[in-house]
Image (tube, helix red, strand yellow):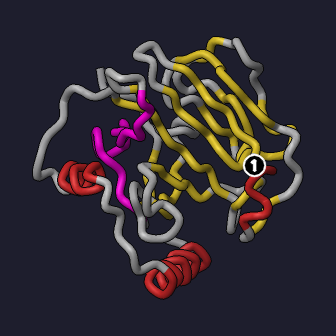
Amino acid sequence: MKTKQLKFIYLFFLTVLLFACSVSKNPLANQIKLLQKGKIKDDTSFVYGLPYETGKAHLLVQGYFSKYTHRNRAALDFKMKKGTKVCAARDGIVLRMKEDGNKGGSNVKYRSYGNYIILLHSDSSQSGYWHLLNNGVLVNPGDTVKQGQVIGLSGRTGYSFFPHLHFIVWKPDAKGKWNQIGSRFQTQKGILYLRPFRFYRNTKPKK
């Protein structure tokens, strides 16, 4: 691992320890922790592809319900340079998108500038891809996309401390209430619920 990458991990981890003391009370947080450790198994949920090109590896800097800005979110942050190709993690239809945001930074005042893509999937769930580059959305509302298709370019728009891709999935329950859900991924090490401060390489599923 490169020295620069190690330094980033170290500094980010220190920031988490210094400024994030609260723990999410969402019951999903504990369930995902058990799934990550392999203490409970799940062979029913959809297996997503990592949201970047096959063969590429990126560092996961925040995971589900991490103690920094994900305390109440089943979301993932992948560290990416500006302009990195973002791929659909699952087949779907482009529901909404925004690409005119041209500002970003570590202040909540920038939140509304965040560029994004939201995909609708066959089971009524939706996946979101945030902080994309200004004019970095490569699809339009209504487009049908395939898993692995390039749909945008990563950036640092919106409330973002550094260039990265924020990924999250929601699904409606029987009453129509939207709930965040944990998502498992196909990786070079098999099908996993991802854990922060690890690199994950995108690989094609074994047939």
Helix, strand or loop at mark 1? loop
Query: 188 or 42, which lies in front?
Result: 42
Query: 179 or 127, which lies in front?
Result: 179
Residue 4 place in picture, x, y as percent: 61, 77
Residue farthest to the left, as pictured = 39
Q: Quadrant of residue 199?
A: bottom left
Residue 59 place in picture, x, y as percent: 51, 59
Q: Is 157 on the left or on the right of 181, as rendered?
A: right
Q: Quadrant of residue 99?
A: top right
Residue 30 place in picture, x, y as percent: 23, 56
Q: Is 155 on the left or on the right of 134, as rendered?
A: left
**Residue located beneath label 1 in the image:** 114
Q: What residue appears at the point 51 percent right and 75 percent down from the top-left corner?
A: 9
Type of amino acid under label 1? Gly
State yes or no: residue 125 in magenta: no
Q: What residue appears at the point 69 percent right and 40 percent down from the top-left corner?
A: 85
**Whether residue 32 is situated above or below residue 24 in the rendered picture:** above
Q: What residue appears at the point 45 percent right and 24 percent down from the top-left corner?
A: 125
Locate the C terminus and report the quarter of the image it occupies: top left
State yes or no: residue 183 in magenta: yes
| Label 1 neighbour load within 10 Å: few <14, some 14-19, many 20+ | many
Magenta region: 177-196
Q: What residue appears at the point 70 percent right and 57 percent down from the top-left corner?
A: 81
**Whether residue 188 is situated above or below residue 162 in the rendered picture:** above
